[in-house]
Image: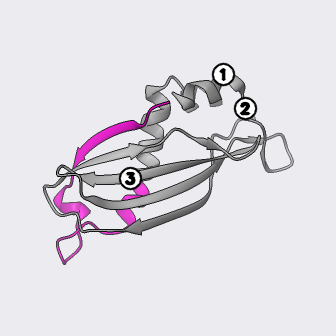
Amino acid sequence: MSDFVRRFLVHWNDCDPARIVFHANFIRWMDEGFTDMTRARGVDFAAMAGADPHFRGSPLVDLRCAFRAPARFADMLEHRIAPPAFTGGRSFRLAHRFLLEDGTLVAEGEQTRIWGRDEGEGLRAVPMPEEVRRRLEG
């Protein structure tokens, strides 16, 4: 199992008046990274939703993010997502790390997600299909 890694440039509109990355962007980048990771590993939520009208994706149920150093306009960030840690049959955790090119840790966070279905009784956490789990583990 290896980390999923993506790199991106910090844009002007990612920054606050102090010219550092606005904190909420790390939350957005965690979500975008999760989507990029799933697609890169062959898990297409749009196709799954089209094939199963009860499928509701992988909703976020808990989140944390700690800021360690500033990231600024024009910095290149490396976003590392560790393979999912399955905490039971219905949820999993994803650890995220954001680093500058020199290796400085900028932020680290964690998402807890479920595998969701709605069969008329509201959103429910259900066991993730084994094939999807294998793909996400990388």
Look at 56% across and 31% down and name the residue there.
Answer: 137
List x then y, in percent, for residue 134.
61, 25
**Three-letter amino acid code at disc 3?**
Arg
Q: Residues within 10 Å of mark 2 (few under 14, many from 20)?
A: few
List x then y, in percent, for residue 112.
61, 53
Instruction: State the SS at label 3.
Output: strand
**Three-letter amino acid code at disc 2?**
Pro
* Magenta-colored stretch includes residue 5: yes
Q: Give the range drawn in magenta.
A: 1-28
**Sequence-first disc among 3 and 1:** 3
Instruction: State the SS at label 1.
Output: helix
The span from disc 3 to disc 1 (Cα, nearest Å) is 26 Å
* Magenta-colored stretch includes residue 89: no
Place residue 90 in its image quadrant.
top right
Left or right of residue 32, residue 13 in this image: left
Left or right of residue 15, residue 49 in this image: right
**Sequence-first disc among 3 and 2:** 2
